[in-house]
Image: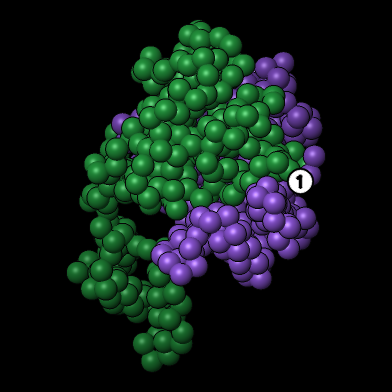
Chain colours: A purple, B green
Amino acid sequence: MRQNYTMKATFDPARVAVVLVRPSHPGNIGAAARAMKTMGLADLALVQPRHFPHAEADAMAAGAKDVLERARVFDELAPALADRELAVGFSARRRDLSHVPREWRELAPEILAAPGRIALVFGNETSGLSNDELLRCQRFATFATNPGYGSLNLAAAVQLATYEVAFAARLFEPAAAGHRAPASGADLEGLHAHLAEALVACGFLDPAKPGRLDERMRRLASRPSLEREEVDLLRGMLRALSARDGDPPAQ
Amino acid sequence: MRQNYTMKATFDPARVAVVLVRPSHPGNIGAAARAMKTMGLADLALVQPRHFPHAEADAMAAGAKDVLERARVFDELAPALADRELAVGFSARRRDLSHVPREWRELAPEILAAPGRIALVFGNETSGLSNDELLRCQRFATFATNPGYGSLNLAAAVQLATYEVAFAARLFEPAAAGHRAPASGADLEGLHAHLAEALVACGFLDPAKPGRLDERMRRLASRPSLEREEVDLLRGMLRALSARDGDPPAQ
């Protein structure tokens, strides 16, 4: 299978750690590890996990068990942040006593543009981060969600957070397009000339009264970005259609 | 609890349906329903789900059981798309026989800007969408992921997809900031004058040799966007500090 993306070699994935504080459900730990790995991250810290290691965490991690195996476990939040220059606390709620959290999509590029190791800190599934835990963070982030039901699953929040990290760091770049070359202007002109010729030859188009057929066909052909192979295919069809009437195949 | 966001009243959530084709794990159906609801969507269609309804789906849906209850179940993909003007097939792989999928983050705003009802179509956890299923879609979308491990969990993919829909539709807008008024220029000038006065009074600052203290303090105060309440708090501290030396509290 060909890969659609390549990973940027200059980004150090260890720059961004994910810290789960007091997670209750081991399945969420595994799903968070999987989410991290899909986005190129691997540094997971767990503060007082209720159950870890656990078979359910392994099952939900799928191909990201290596992230679980290397996860560091702490008794408190402070030592999990000791090697980090910046901790970002994720919170679903606006709290009166803390800073108003900023939309992560907007904040992530600012943070990733500056140097320093970062922790993305997520609280317990039910209670989130306590005020004490939030006060250990220097930035506060959130996701815009449904005011009627904004309860993101913990692993879903990690997925969104790491997705924005990958995007902000431009971590994945489209791989070279390979053989699917887009059609050039000359390819398209060749197609239109060929089509006009075939339609005149078969009597569909009267060259004295072309009407708006050429315009319509150009509009149709411009809708999808035609690939060179597709132009070749269409011209092959035209050759075959023209030949059916006994004329020599058009070139 | 105060809400951080309001939902745009002019967006019709029924415009965007999520279609899960042959999902194997009922937990993923529930988690997808939850993901949808957090992003303001509610229209879920299931094509040949292996198990549905199912207790595990209910458990993973958490507060989004209403989405599961209203989910429509189909035997085939075509009828699930019958009321949709556009179907977007999500695929993790580039396939030689189909269009190259586009990054959903880039495609979603284009699609949401046009009128018409949309289906976001996701395949089976293991095999994805078949070629036949992909051919029923008019657009193809993907997420940039780790080339070494790009396997998004099904519900995680639904979370990312609907997150981008909410963003592209500007579905959630920050609620009014409430009482946390930012400090005005006058508030800040009052603070700096008060500080200078207190520092002169306590002997820390010699008004004949101010040096760069004022500049430094202004720089410090401008770093976070100070709120009016915080300015009040700081001035209260200055008053108290000044009064400690036996001077009358500065106003």
Residue B207 found in image quarter: bottom left
Q: Amino acid at mark 1?
A: Gln
Determine which quarter of the picture holds residue B213.
bottom left
Q: Which residue is mark 1?
A: A3
Say which residue appears at 42% left-offset and 64% top-offset: A212
Badge 1, how many Cα within 10 Å: few under 14, some, many 20+?
Answer: some
Q: In the displayed image of the protein, which residue is found farthest to the bottom?
A: B208
Q: Is residue B149 left or right of residue A158?
A: right
A42 or A91: nearer the viewer: A42
> Is residue A242 in sight in this rendering?
yes
Left or right relative to B175: residue A220: right
Q: Chain of mark 1?
A: A
Q: Position of residue B231 (x, y in %)?
A: 30, 62
| Mark 1 secondary-structure assignment | loop
User: Front-most of A228 and A21?
Assistant: A228
Q: Is residue A222 left or right of residue A85?
A: left
Quadrant assignment for the C terminus of chain A: bottom right
Residue closest to the eye, B121 or B125: B121
Q: Quadrant of the N terminus of chain A?
A: top right
Please give the count of numbered marks on the rendered protein: 1
Answer yes or no: is residue B59 visible: no
Where residue A241 sits: x, y (%)? 65, 49
Kindly identify the residue that appears in the image at 38 percent across and 14 percent down: B69
Q: Position of residue A191 (x, y in %)?
A: 63, 62
Q: Residue at x 57, y 43 (%)?
A: B141
Horizontal and vertical percent position of residue A247: 69, 56
In the displayed structure, would residue A87 be above or below residue A127?
Answer: below
Res A35 → quadrant: top right
Above or below B9: residue B105: below
* x 47%, y 45%: residue: B164
